[in-house]
Image (tube, grey):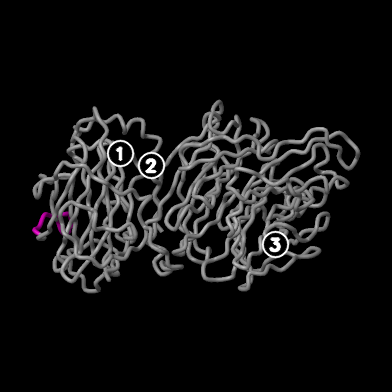
Amino acid sequence: MKINSLFFLMLLSIAVSCSKSDDPIGDGDGSGDKGQQQSLNLSSINDLNQGEPAINSHEDVVSRSSLMMNFRTYVDVGQGDTGVQWPNYVRIKKLSNGTYMMFCQQSTASDPNGLDTYYATSPDLVNWTGKGFLFQRKDGYTNARNQPAQRLFTNANGLVLENGDLLVFASYRVSPGYSDLLCHNDNGIVMMRSSDNGKTWSEPQEIYHGPNWEAMMVQLPSGEIQCYFSESRPSISGGHSGTSMVVSSDNGQTWSPSLNQAPYRVVRQHWFNQDKNATFYTDQMASVIKLNNTDKLAVAIESSLSSTNNQTTYGISFAYSPDNGEWTHLVDDELGPDDRQNYLFSGAAPTLIQFPSGESIVSYGISSHLNIRMGDVEAREFGEPFVALPGRGSWGTIELDDSHSFIAAMRNSENSNNVVISLAKYFLNHRITASSRSVEVDGDNSEWENTDEALFVGQKSQAQATLRCSSDDENVYFLVEVLDDDISKDDSVNIYITPDNSSDKVNADSRRIRVSHSGLKSTDNYGGGWREIDMNVSVSAAYDGTLSDNSDTDNGYLVELAVPKSELNLSSGDFLINFSLFDIQGGEDAISNTADANTENWIPVSLQ
């Protein structure tokens, strides 16, 4: 699976200062139809891929799927937006009305554990409004030893139910007394409900009593809600006792087991603590999904691995329920489940999601960075990691936004005097099916539909491009749309095409088509390098802005192309594609490295 690294973000302050008159990439002369300057209604990637997704439609080609951040969505959300000076443990939920809610906790420089929890709302993931406390610490409390104490809140999270209701919840602990067995039931999980997307809230409801951290909920197709948490029994297990749960069959009105009873214990294994010369339980910070087209549940957990000099190392483990989705309830010293992968890679604090098309995604923290890997439809095999967001922080998360995108977020404490929440949207590039359509190549995108499947590049600067594909008996058609605030005369787009063959290398049948806001630049085939040939390609281009004039704000440009099928040597009718954008601000941005002759990360295109 190809993953695009984002270390380029640290260089943006240099890249965006480049003049639009810098040398162009390549050697095309801009020959072909000249682009027309006109007002354009350009499509954003946010508006595309709107067709109904088919579940596990990409199961057989997940290895060619890739992820790309939308640079325009990257924001740092600071204290002025959240009202929180030291935000930590960020979680984001998309509400039933399409808006967003962010949860975080107020920590301190020396103590990352929450004291109070807060929330903020946003219509677009960019503009946030702090709403104040979600769950606020309670003073004047008396613990089970009849001592004056506080109730402190941490790890706020949420779940949107099938009926549109929003459940929000948090772990709470008593101080002093958290590690005191007599005060066991002074700790717990509290929940509130909103039926109007957070405008009003129910009274708090306690759903579990006992020391715990990191509660998260899922709702199954049956309607059952499962609340998972890291059960913490310090008196017997050194802080973590695996993952446990309570369940509700009535949309969260009542929960079982009942308060003050032991929860259902479902995921745990042993680890040896060298510092204490003792064996404890682990498997905490659970993130649970129901795998597509099955009843099976998959959970990513953080597992303690070793501890020396009071420094614990962690690995990311995965556990899987039986096929019916029903966990075995562990008793006494039982460990489980049997179906699991332990310490698959180093890291902590995982989040697991799955796209409808099948790709599973796991995020986790390592070396103070939020890392992401893409996996298969069973969440068992994962590709190489990449750093998802700039800065340094911890306890990040990912949240599915729609069928082709998710939100990545984390506390960014790179600047200790200005701790912020960094977030951005990632988009999924995977196999697309060309729509059946004969296109009039006239530089007008009105005949294309937002249900057409699209590819996206746009992680290096504000300039970004989408690519859609159609076909008829004679031609393959492409629509390229580029959003660009600052169009340069040297900006361009390259489309790389090769027959879907087993060699995974560019060859004599591979083609490159270079276009820009001014039309066709060149058509080339590969023979140890790209050489210009005549492919009888029809091109029409239009642009909305002023070329190489950075005194104003441009809109962008579009290019329509018709490529004769006879020029592509398509024996199977399908082909592989790579897509790159050159912009003077960000340089080249591509789905797959264009300097590499390997095509294993190119995207398949299916012709109807």
Name the residue carrying label 3: 250
Look at the image and tell me in which quarter the C terminus lies.
bottom left
Is residue 533 a member of the stretch shown in magenta? yes
Q: Nearer the viewer, residue 91 or 191?
A: 191
At label 3, the amino acid type is Asp
Q: Residue furthest top?
A: 417
Task: Classify residue 354 as left or right of residue 460.
Answer: right
From this view, report whether residue 480 is shown above or below residue 110: below
**SS under mark 2:** helix
State the separation of the CA atoms marked 1 and 3.
52 Å
Determine whether label 2 and label 1 are within 8 Å by CB.
Answer: yes
Q: Nearer the viewer, residue 217 or 489?
A: 217
Task: Classify residue 190 as left or right of residue 319.
Answer: right
Nearer to us: label 2 or label 1: 2
At label 2, the amino acid type is Phe
**Residue range of the region highlighted in magenta in the rendering:** 524-534
From this view, report whether residue 502 is shown above or below residue 65: below
Q: Nearer the viewer, residue 53 or 445?
A: 445
Q: Residue at the location (86% across, 47% down)?
A: 181
Name the residue carrying label 1: 586
**Callout 3 crowding tier (Cα within 10 Å): few <14, some 14–19, many ≥20:** few
Mark before the other along the chain sequence, 1 or 3: 3
From this view, report whether residue 160 is shown above or below residue 57: above
Q: Which mark, residue 71?
A: 2
**SS under mark 1:** loop
